[in-house]
Image (cartoon, rainbow, N blue to C red):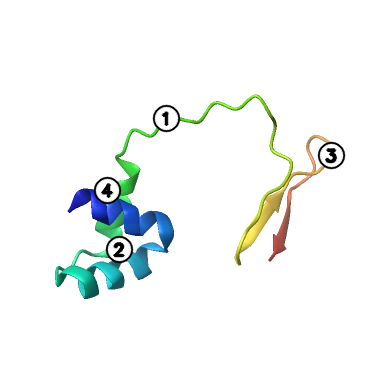
Amino acid sequence: MEKNALLVCANESYQRAEEDLSSLTGLKISHSTLQRLVQKQNLELPNSIVGVQEVSLDGGKIRLRTAAKGEPCQWKRL
């Protein structure tokens, strides 16, 4: 069950994962419990010899650092 919960959390928001697990299994696991389950995983960072060139985001806000040190960061809505 834990493996399935982690899989659903990887594809959706925790709230949506809560709804999907309830629909698929009939078991109710709260979104906060799913978040704690994901956060306790010991996930290794991938090794890459190539730097990141692009990032794709769907909704929300991102923090952009300014070029000059000491200046406040900028927040942009996507």
Amino acid type at image mark 3: Ala
Q: Which mark is residue 31?
A: 2
> Would you call the spot at circle 1 few (<14 residues within 10 Å), some (14-19), or many (20 or more)?
few
Q: Which mark is residue 9?
A: none
Location of residue 10 (image quadrant): bottom left
- Label 2 or label 3, whichever lies nearer to me, is 2
Q: Position of residue 23 (x, y in %)?
A: 23, 75
- Label 1 or label 4, whichever lies nearer to me, is 1
Q: Which of 23 and 70 lies nearest the eye of the viewer? A: 23
Give SS at disc 4: helix
- Label 3 or label 1, whichever lies nearer to me, is 1
Q: Which of 31 and 21 lies nearest the eye of the viewer? A: 21
Q: Which residue is mark 1?
A: 44
| Above/below status of 18 relative to 8 | below
Gap between marks 1 and 4 measured at Cα: 16 Å
> Would you call the spot at circle 3 few (<14 residues within 10 Å), some (14-19), or many (20 or more)?
few
- Which residue: 21% across, 50% down? 2
